[in-house]
Image (cartoon, coloured by chain):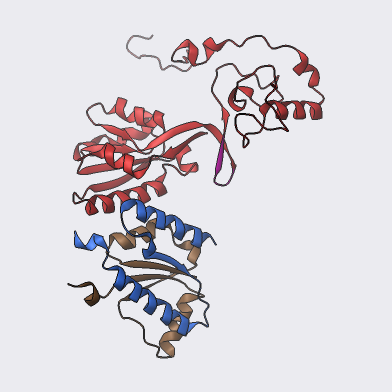
Chain colours: A blue, B brown, C red
Amino acid sequence: MNAKRRVRYVAQLLDQIGLEGERVAMANISSAMGAQFAELVTDTTERLRELGPSPLKET
Amino acid sequence: MSDADFDPLLVVFCCRHCAYAAADLAGGLRIQYPPSVRIVEVPCSGRVDAVEMLHAFEQGADGVIVAG
Amino acid sequence: MIVGEQKPLDEVMELLGDARKVLLAGCGTCVTVCFAGGEKEVGILASQLRMRSKLEGHAMEVDEVTVQRQCEWEFIDPLASRLKDYDVVLSLACGIGIQGMNERFPSTITLPGVNTTFLGIPEKQGVWEERCQACGDCILAVTAGICPIARCSKQLLNGPCGGSQNGVCEIDPDTPCAWQLIWDRARELGTVDKLLEIQKPKDWSKSRDGGPRKIVREDLVLIDEQTGD
C-alpha cells in the first residue's frame, strides 16, 4: 500500500519535471505468477516504445 | 532513431518474495520477455524510496515498475 | 516544532535563474521531522532539479548536503570552505536557518526552498496543525492548556464568540472552535471558575507588536578573556 502511494507521488514529481508521470507504475505479482510477470514487462515495454524514449536521453 | 526502433530501458524493482520469484519462475519456464528489462531485487516493495525511482530516470531509464 | 513546506518546483526554478552550480542544503532538525527539508527531501529535490534543468537545456550541477541545524553557527561553519564552488546555495531549512546561512556567509547567496509556515504539532502522520504563535506571554494556565491566540481565528481572550457553532469555527468548518475545546476541558478538570474571570487586554508588546525580540542571559553570555567583561 505504501509502495503504491509512493509510486503515485513519484508520478507527480515526474510531471513537475516535465517527464511523463505514466512512466512509473506499481504492479502486484505473486511468486507463482511467472507468466504474468513476463506479460507485464512485455506490455510495459511496448507501451514505452509507443511513448518514445525518455526526453532526458535526447538532451 | 525512430521511436519504433528503440528498446525501452525498463527498470523493475522486484520484491524478493513476490515479483523476483515470479521473474525467476518465468526464466525457469523459458518464457520470453524483452532483454532490455533490468531487474533490481529489493527486500520488499515498501523499501523502494522516491529518490531511488528518480535516480533510475536520471540514469537513463525509460520506465520504472515497482512490483510487489 | 517549526513546520514548513517545500516551495513549488516552478518557483524554485525561477529563483535559481541561470545558476549552474547549486548546493542544496538541508537541515536535520525541524524541517526533517516535518518532511520539508531533511536529507531525504534534499535527495528528491536535487534529482528533480538535475532532470528538469537538463530537459530545459541548461543542465545544473546540484550537490547535496544536510547539516544537523542551519540555525546554529557551529553546525554551518564547516560548510565555509565548500561555498566558493557554487553559484548559489538553495536552503531547505526554515527561515531562521536560511538567514543563518546568509548572515554567516555574506558573500554567498542563499535562497529559500521552503516556506516556513507555523509552530505546530504533527497531529497525526502527514497532518500538521498550528499550536503556538510565540506571543511572548503564555496564558495556557488560564485557558485549560489550549491556546486561543494560536487556535482561535479571532484570538479572543474571553470566548467563545457568537460564530462558534456545534464546536466548529465560523471562519472554517474544518477548524474546531478553540474556545469550545477550552470550555470542554475546563469542565472536565473542574476549573470553569478560571474562565469566568474576565481576561484584561493582553500585553502585545511582548509579542511581535513590540518589534523584533531578543533574549539576553547574562549568566550564559561568554566572558571576554582579554577585557574580563
Residue at image point 41% right, 86% down: B27
Quadrant placement of the C terminus of chain A:
bottom left
C22 left or right, relative to A36: left
B38 left or right, relative to A57: right
Residue at image point 23% right, 39% down: C17
Quadrant in the rendering for residue B65: bottom left
Q: Residue furthest left?
A: B1
C83 left or right, relative to C172: left
Q: Confirm whether the magenta stretch covers residue C125.
A: yes
Quadrant placement of the N terminus of chain A:
bottom right
Range drawn in magenta: C124-129
Overall secondary structure of the magenta section: strand
Q: Position of residue C67 (x, y in %)?
A: 37, 40
For the image, the number of numbered tags is: 0
Q: Confirm whether the magenta stretch covers residue C121.
A: no
Q: Position of residue B66 (x, y in %)?
A: 44, 67
Residue C29 seen anywhere in this rendered image of the structure: no
Q: Residue furthest right?
A: C190
Quadrant in the rendering for residue C87: top left
Q: Position of residue B17 (x, y in %)?
A: 51, 75
Q: Is residue A38 above or below residue C4?
A: below
Residue at image point 43% right, 58% down: B49
Q: Position of residue C148 (x, y in %)?
A: 64, 23
